[in-house]
Image (cartoon, helix red, strand yellow):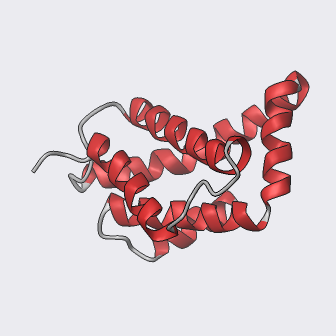
Amino acid sequence: MADEIFNGLMSQNPATFEQFLRALIKNRIDFISDNRKTFQILVKEVIYREEFKKELAPLVSEIITHHFNKVIETFKERGDLIEKPTPILLRMLLTFLCGYFTSRFVLITDDFVMDEDAELDEVVRFIMDGLSKPI
């Protein structure tokens, strides 16, 4: 599924990392919204069951990070992202996104977002303010 998501988003040939990020976050919000209960169970299982976390970790490490590394490198080469080592950018990005999705769909579930578009704008802007190469 990760291959399909990343390849699909990159095939749209986003001109900037911000466009890619906006499309990715929107895609994941839609998916998690449609699969909220499953996502909540997944997060809880990762937190409370060490064997599940050990089973899931290689998948995240091998698949998700591979795709994000390629995307980050692509946009770094285009001059769209700050010159920091890719593993650091990846860790910052994944930490924020995982925290955001967990907060939104697991921890604070009642009326967390009033305006979907405004929320997406704020999330993207928050990330881009930290990752964008200064003009």
Query: What is the tally of numbered marks visible in this picture?
Result: 0
Left or right: residue 43 versus residue 9 is right
User: Going 32% across and 54% down the picture, which residue do you hit?
Assistant: 75
Left or right: residue 50 versus residue 114 is right
Q: Is residue 130 above or below residue 4?
A: above
User: Going 34% across and 31% down the picture, which residue do you hit?
Assistant: 85
In the current view of this chain or complex, which residue is farthest to the top? Answer: 50
Q: Position of residue 93 (x, y in %)?
A: 46, 41
Q: Position of residue 96 (x, y in %)?
A: 50, 39
Left or right: residue 48 versus residue 71 is right
Report the front residue among 1 and 34: 34
In the current view of this chain or complex, which residue is farthest to the bottom? Answer: 12
- Is the N terminus in the top left, top right, bottom left or bottom right quadrant? bottom right
User: Going 39% across and 74% down the picture, which residue do you hit?
Assistant: 13
Q: Position of residue 129 (x, y in %)?
A: 27, 45
Q: Position of residue 87 (x, y in %)?
A: 44, 31
User: Going 30% across and 70% down the picture, which residue do you hit?
Assistant: 15
Give the quarter of the image for residue 29. bottom right
Q: Is residue 108 above or below residue 75?
A: above
In the current view of this chain or complex, which residue is farthest to the left? Answer: 135
Report the front residue among 112 and 62: 112
Q: Is residue 70 above or below residue 87?
A: below
